[in-house]
Amino acid sequence: MSGGEIMQEVWTIKQKFLFISGSFAIAVSIFLGFKYVFPLISPFVIAYIIALAIEKPVNKLSKLFRGKKHPASTIIVVLLAIVIFVALAALFYAVFKEVKNFFVNYQYNMVVVKQTAAKICFNLDGMFGLREGCCMDALEMCTRYIEKAFNENASSAVVNRVAEISLPAIVKIAVFIGGVFVSFISVIYLSDKLDVIRDWCNSTHFREEILAVTSSLKQLMSVYYRIELLITIINIVVLTVGFFIIGNSYAIVLGVVIGILDMLPVFGTGTVLIPWLLFDLACGNTFSAIVLLFVYAVTWLVREIMESKCVGDRVGISPLVMLIIIFVGILVYGVMGFILGPVSYCMAKALILYLKTVIGRGTLNDKKNFE
């Protein structure tokens, strides 16, 4: 590298100040936008993503309607809605049956739990050379303490709390259903406007900024979220099959819950499966423990291999950085931080890198940039 090239890379104090202040403004703007504005426009953002996803089949089907996209998009949206509704209905029905079965057999389940707890306690007595019944006495003492703490006042407080949560929950569910309906209707209207939106993006004064952000988000959507969804579906299937093999009556519910838990940072299938298989070993259920160990190994390998090979290499974000992004996103945005965290990071990174390029070129204050 020549001396002239080295000198060109040295920034002035003004350039450094512009970069730091601009980066801070970008980060704050993205945070405020996703925190307060995005919830209001999320149905339309989702509609735009769906419209892009079904654009090719809509264009092909529109040939049957003399190039009119509204009828074509309406047919595809209706079919898509039916498929999603049937899939969710089947899943909810299976979950409902298992939950109902749990409450119908509640007394039997409690007897099984007590018998299993007693068996484990007696095994621990023998393992550690304790007096027979020592662990059982300690467990009963803890149970009595918990029952005493959960008195009538606590029960009424729980009932009051449930009543306070119920109405807002019903309102949120109604808003969610309305948002889904608005999204599907918006998809039909947007399917005919995608070319207009592209023309605007190409002609606007902010086309370079839009290109930087959309390129980063396309890579994130087409790689990271697609791979994460595929990993989750595979692991849910593996978990459910494993639970069916060991004869668990709630295989579908547990498979879905643990599969979703595996998506969260820090947590994973091992959070549930490892204590479960240790519990089975303590109870003498060797076959069940071996199956759970195999299921855990498969789900762990699926996530590790697909994330490291498909996500890390193609998105350019290391697993550690992605873990930090998702964790901070959940702290900032709540549960939706799993999605909004990486999106915010990619948008901020793209805009900050673009700002760095503009400042490096010395064109930030160029009048042409604002005409």
Image (cartoon, rainbow, N blue to C red):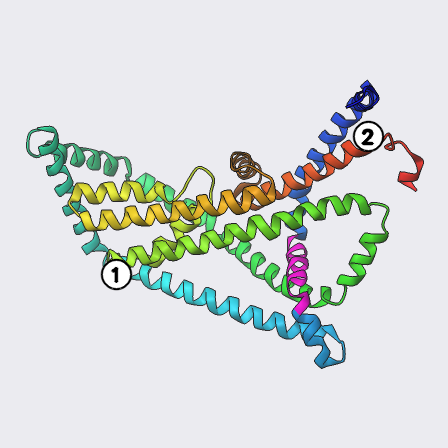
Q: Quadrant of the C terminus?
A: top right
The percent position of residue 103, horizontal first and vertical second, equals 28, 58
Q: Amino acid at mark 1?
A: Val
Q: Quadrant of the N terminus?
A: top right
Quadrant of the rendered image containing residue 22: top right
The percent position of residue 279, horizontal first and vertical second, equals 22, 42
Q: Label 1 vs label 2: CA separation?
A: 68 Å
Instruction: Please check the rendered image and state whether residue 135 is part of the magenta-colored stretch, yes or no.
Output: no
Q: Residues within 10 Å of mark 1 (few under 14, many from 20)?
A: few
- What residue is pinned by disc 1? 104
Residue found at x 32% / y 50%: 295
Name the dominant secondary structure of the magenta segment.
Answer: helix
The percent position of residue 122, horizontal first and vertical second, equals 10, 38
Left or right relative to 253: residue 187: right
Residue closest to the eye, 353 or 132: 353
Q: Magenta stretch?
A: 42-56
Which residue appears farthest toward the front when viewing the image? 2
Residue found at x 63% / y 65%: 184
In the picture shown, does residue 363 fall above or below 181?
A: above
Residue found at x 81% / y 61%: 196
Q: Amino acid at mark 2?
A: Ile
Quadrant of the rendered image containing residue 100: bottom left
Mark before the other along the chain sequence, 1 or 2? 1
Q: Residues within 10 Å of mark 2 (few under 14, many from 20)?
A: some
Is residue 168 visible to us here?
no
Is residue 363 visible to us here?
yes
- What residue is pinned by disc 2? 359
In the picture shown, does residue 202 fall above or below 144?
A: below
Residue closest to the eye, 246 or 47: 246
Q: Indicate which disc residue 141 carries.
A: none
Residue closest to the eye, 287 or 104: 287
Q: Are marks 1 and 2 in contact (CB under 8 Å)?
A: no
